[in-house]
Amino acid sequence: MRILSLHCRGYRNLQDVFFEPGPDVNVIWGQNAQGKTNLLEALWLFTGGRSFRGTKDSELVMHGTDKAELELCFFSEEREQTAAVSIADGRRKAELNGIPLPSPGRLVGHIGAVIFSPEHVALVRGGPADRRVFLDAALCQIHPGYVRLLNRYQHTLSQRNALLKDIPRHRELEDTLPIWDARLVSDGEMIVRERRKYLECLAQKAAKIYDGLSRGQEKLSLSYLCTANDFSSSLRQERERDIRQGFTGTGPHRDDMEILLDGCAARSCGSQGQKRSIVLSLKLAEAKMLEAVSKEKPAVLLDDVLSELDNSRQDYLLNHLSGCQVFITCCEPAQVQLLQVGKLFHTEAGTVIPGAPEE
Ligand SMILES: Nc1ncnc2c1ncn2[C@@H]1O[C@H](COP(=O)(O)OP(=O)(O)O)[C@@H](O)[C@H]1O
Ligand SMILES: [Mg+2]
C-alpha cells in the first residue's frame, strides 16, 4: 500500500493542506504544536479507526468551522484508489472510490497503518487496559467484525452493570441477570478466542524481532492472561460480589497480556532500554501481522519516537521497515540518523510544505 496524496480541509489546525509523500521515508519536521501529529492522525483515520489520541470526532473539526474534509489517493491491490472521510455535526462519514460506506469502520482492510509514539511505552509500564487497547486496536484493523463484536460486548456489559446497581433495591431484578450473562458469555468467549489467536502469532514474531534487537541477550515472551477461564461459571460464582460492587469483576474486559523477559515481568524488572525494545518489537510485529493478513505493506507512522531510540535501534527499525512507506515526525531532521531520507516536509502553523531546514 502506498499513500499518493492527502488533502485536508478544516481538520484540527490543518486548514487547507495538500500533502504528496514519497514512496519510502518521509520526514515531517517542525516546532511543537504546529500540526505534525495532526497530519499523522489524519492519515490514521483512513484505517477506519478512531483518533489514536482518543479524541472525540467533534473535536477533530477546526475550531470555528463546522466541517472537516479529508481525501486520500492511494495505491493498493494493484490500482489507484481514493477514499474520503468527513466529520460534521459530530458524525464521521467515509467513502471509498466515490461510494459512500455504511460506516467509517468499513474502511478497515483497505488502508493499513501502524502508529508508534512515545506514549506506547505504556504497553509495558501501564496497566492491563493499555495492553487490551493495543490488542483490540490491532484486531479491529484486521477484522471489521471484531469492532462490532467488541461494541456489542461493551453494550451488554454496561447493561449488566446498570442492572447490578439496581438489584440491591429491587431484588426481583436478579431473575433477569442470566439473560445478560448468556449474551456476555457468548460474545466474551469469542473475544478471548480472537485475542488468543492473534497473540499467539504476534508473540512469535515479536520474540524474533526482540532477539535481533537485543542480539540474543534475553528472551521475550508474551501470553494472554485470562481473568475467567470458564467465564460462564465465574459469572455465576461471583454474582454476589458483583451485586455488592455494582459492576462485573471478571471477563475479557479485565484480561491482560503478560510480558516477560527471561521469565521475569518486564514491567518491574526491565530497564528503560529493554522496555523501549519491547515496545518496538510489539509494533514491528503488529506491522508484520497486518502485512500477512492484508498482503499489503502497511504505512508506518512514527510520531516523535526516533529521538528516543539510539542509533542501533533506529538502524534495526529502518532496516526492518524496508519496502514500507514511513512517516516520521520530529523537531529537527538531524535527530533522524537515517541512512537515507526520501522526502522532507516542514510543518508550521498548520501548513505542510516540502523542504529542509536552512543550513
Ligand atoms: N480542533 C482544532 N482546531 C484548531 N486547532 C486545533 C484543533 N485541535 C488541535 N489544534 C491545534 O493543533 C496544534 C497541535 O498540533 P499537533 O499536531 O499535536 O502538534 P505537533 O506538531 O507538536 O505534533 C495545537 O496548536 C492545537 O491548538
Ligand atoms: Mg506531536
Image (cartoon, rainbow, N blue to C red):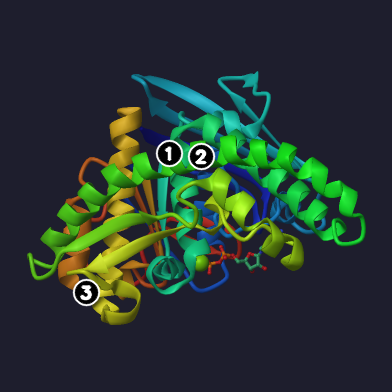
**What residue is pinned by disc 3?**
310
**Which quadrant of the figure contains the C terminus?**
bottom left
Where does residue 203 sit, x and y in percent of width and height? 26, 51
Is residue 99 among the parts visible in the rendering? yes
Q: Is residue 266 left or right of residue 54?
A: left
The kind of secondary structure element at disc 2 is: helix
The kind of secondary structure element at disc 1 is: helix
- Answer with mark 3 or mark 2, whichever residue precedes in sequence: 2
Q: Amino acid at mark 3?
A: Asp
**What residue is pinned by disc 1?**
193
Where does residue 187 sit, x and y in percent of width and height? 58, 37
Q: Is residue 62 left or right of residue 341?
A: right
- The number of discs equals 3
**What residue is pinned by disc 2?**
189
The kind of secondary structure element at disc 3 is: loop
- Cβ atoms under marks 3 and 1 closer than 8 Å: no
- Answer with mark 3 or mark 1, whichever residue precedes in sequence: 1
- Could you give the CA–CA distance between mark 2 and mark 1, rounded to whole angstroms? 6 Å
Q: Amino acid at mark 1?
A: Arg
- Cβ atoms under marks 2 and 1 closer than 8 Å: yes
Viewer-side label of 3, 1: 1
CB of mark 1 near ligand 2 (< 8 Å) = no
**Which quadrant of the figure contains the N terminus?**
top left
